[in-house]
Amino acid sequence: MKVSIITVCFNSASTISDTLDSVQSQSYGDIEHVIVDGGSSDGTVELLESRRANLGALISEPDEGLYDAMNKGVLAATGDIIGVLNSDDIFESDDVVATVVDTFRESPDCDLVFGDVVFAEADDLSKVIRYYGAKHFRPWKLRFGWMPPHPATFVRRQAYDLAGPYRVDMKISADYEMFVRWLLKARLRWKYLSKVLVRMRSGGISTSGLRSSITLNREIVLACRENGIYTNLLMVLSKIPFKLAELVRRPG
């Protein structure tokens, strides 16, 4: 199986080298790393060009935001399996992609494989501050605002072909809306991999303050309703105490 890893970036010169190193250090051999840059001006493009030999498609142009860039990456990807790794994140170990591919091979009817992530201090990746596990996820929990960690999700190409592109009219929750389409509408088959797959720097758009939280939860309700799935804001907000527990929970 060929695996495509999509990284979207914009002015990421200070972090993207770690991401590139993480992909290039994977033990699995058949990987293409697709980069979609939004027209950076901080040296990101020059850095990417200096490492061009180890990359797949490299797109650098203005876009309509994160999810527009992700759509460009999916279109450019040629792999059987597609994963998304943010430009300030890294794989947790060198065998992540190999383990994911083994899981797909062991379960040929599986469409999605996802695992866990940890959040680390932005300036110290060795310091874990939050664990985001998917062990207890079930598709019905999407109605309550729960989703598997998108950066730790790998999907067969056919899942994107079936569901279509990410919505570009959503600011934060288009990945959540895609899970609704994959798991509740199309009822694609999935498997949980009990392993931390990705280490993320804290401070992403979906965790950056009250205003983002309000937008996130409103978009979650909209994502369900527009796909014919009933929920309401109170149901979605019921997850908050459990989310707070992630600050003290650890893998294992």
Image (cartoon, rainbow, N blue to C red):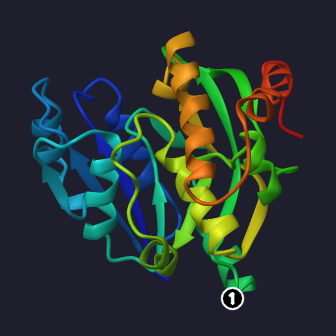
Amino acid beneath label 1: Pro
Where in the figure is residue 33, as x and y percent of width and height?
33, 60
Q: Secondary structure at mark 1?
A: loop
As drawn, is 71 to the left or to the right of 152?
left
In the image, 55 versus 104, the foreground residue is 104
Residue drawn at (53%, 57%), measured in percent from left and top? 178
In the rendered image, which quarter is residue 50 located in? top left
Q: Reply above or below: 2 against 170.
A: below
In the image, 122 versus 183, the foreground residue is 183
In the image, 93 versus 150, the foreground residue is 150
In the rendered image, which quarter is residue 109 located in? bottom right
Residue drawn at (68%, 88%), measured in percent from left and top? 108
Residue drawn at (74%, 84%), measured in percent from left and top? 106
Where in the figure is residue 214, as x and y percent of width and height?
57, 20
Residue for badge 1: 108
Where in the figure is residue 15, as x and y percent of width and height?
35, 28
As drawn, is 104 to the left or to the right of 44?
right
Name the quadrant of the C terminus.
Answer: top right
Crowding near the residue tagged with mark 1, few <14, some 14–19, many ≥20 C-alpha atoms within 10 Å? few
